[in-house]
Image: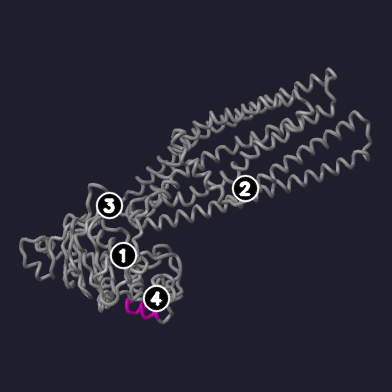
Amino acid sequence: MTPSTSAPQRGWLKQQTPLAGRYLTLATGLGVLSGCLLIFQAWCLAKVVDGAAFQGEALNELMPWLWIMLALFIARAALAWASEQTAFCGAAQIKVEVRDRLVKKIQALGPVFLSSEHSGELANTLSDGVEALEAYYARFVPAISLMALVPLSILAFVFPTDLTSALVMLFTAPLIPLFMILIGKGAERLNQRQWKKLARMSAHFLDVIQGLTNLKLFNASRREAAVIARISDEYRRSTLSVLRIAFLSSFALEFFSTISIAIVAVLIGFRLYWGELDFFLGFFVLLLAPEFYLPLRNMGTHYHARMEAIGAAERIVEILETTVPETPTITSKPPTGPLEIRFEHVSYSYEPGRPALINASFTIRPEERFALIGPSGSGKSTIINLLLGFIRPDSGSIMLNGVDLDTLSPEAWRSLIAWVPQHPRLFHGTLIDNIRLSKPDATMSEVRRAANMAHADKFIMELPDAYQTRVGERGQGLSGGQIQRIALARAFLKDAPLVLLDEATANLDLESERLVQAGINKLAKGRTLITIAHRLQTIRDADRILVMESGRPIESGNHQQLINNSEGFYSRFISIHDGADTPPRSSR
């Protein structure tokens, strides 16, 4: 990454500084105050050494200065602690705000955006990426201010005391940040590559973990373990290359600061030997010399925090600047009563040149069991995504009881929809909390009634803690059929007039399929039910079937009407798959 390409990240990092409020300013002020106390401390130490070695003062005469030094030591320690804690509080505020904005942006972008991203990379950005900002704001930003303010404060005392030493400090000080920047440019590019490698490695590792069952089934786990080992080793080698440059930068900083301090010490030594400088003043300046270069060296030490933050900020900025679909202008009230859904010449493309839906027109009647079938990529999932409001048509309109979907509030419209995907998501927590996701204020009796209608109450009550039984992420601890019935219970609890199903009976054993299908039959009564069908039983039970191909509806009718058309896609499909259980799957 060249310096020009990192400019947006640097600008973005600076823009977030006000989010820390006054914490970073206070942390800098405490650091400067500590620097001023350091000057006084050096003065006291020089006074004690000069009095004891050259003025012949007794211990009792020096005790006041020693007590003052002790107080200064304690005060500086307290200031250092307070400065660090204050800077951390400021950085924490920025992290919370940035992470909150990222989560809200990802929510606004919706499931379509998530489906095109690696979950491991997003998780890495939300966790390690945001955490990488802490060192930048808590250490590097205050160090930048202290690098200028503390040396200037020291020079203000050294100039009237020893002009020669002050000039040496003034002309050698810029060499440290200069060489740090020159070396840091190379490390910045390498560090940016490291963040990209880490993101890819995180995404790959999470994908492997999620697919571990399939890898075991196909005896490919050892192969993937070898791939992860190779990727990890490559990451280790590239990390060492970044560290080599970082160590070179530290060496350059230490070298120039040591040489500069040595020059000041030699000049003071010669002038003391020739009697041109008083010992007290010379020793005072010599004590301040290392402290003069210390903020510069600290800034160099924390410079890697800046590089790491720039690397992390690239992906953060990319997500935050992703365009969110326009929010529709709300001009209509949500429809009431039985729903009639009409697609009028609707087209949609997920990316230019690859249409997912082309001039689709069809009507779904109130309280109808409506099935969508077709080969993969035919547009079935796109229709569901449009109805859920995750995407909006590129052209055409979707009418709900005569009201354009684009004129409705997405939240109000989704309150009328219950969605049961093929692989429902259960979260870590109790079963009752998972069911209440569709209606958080539901009473226990309402939850049990919904679970009973979904044929879930019986198995739940047989569990040790019944509805208070805790399950793991993705429903760990439950079978596939039990998870599907929990999802159906959510739909019953919501009691929405429109139900969207992505073949809830797929991949289940016969008994689980029978129970889930019985629950679906109850759920369909008095509601409009739209199903992406993968199983022949679901297709035959539908009041009407819409056959999709290449983004276009090509046939419509019930099972008997479509099978009578011997030249149609549906008839050919039934003849080929007669007796089979699963037609072609869909991805869109």
The main secondary structure of the magenta stretch is helix
Closer to the eye: label 3 or 4: 3
For the point 25% across and 66% down, which residue is it? 503
- Residue behind mark 4: 460
Looking at the image, tell me whether mark 2 or mark 3 is earlier in sequence order: 2
- Residue behind mark 3: 350
For the point 83% across and 37% down, which residue is it? 44
- Residue behind mark 2: 24
Using the numbered discs, state the Cα–Cα distance from disc 2 to disc 3 in whole angstroms.
Answer: 44 Å
> In which quadrant of the rendered image does the C terminus lie?
bottom left
What's under tag 4, amino acid-wise?
Ile
The verdict on residue 53 being magenta is no
SS under mark 1? helix
Residue 500, percent across and down? 28, 68
Using the numbered discs, state the Cα–Cα distance from disc 2 to disc 4 in whole angstroms.
Answer: 53 Å
Looking at the image, tell me whether mark 1 or mark 2 is earlier in sequence order: 2
> Is residue 461 placed above or below 45 in the rendered structure?
below
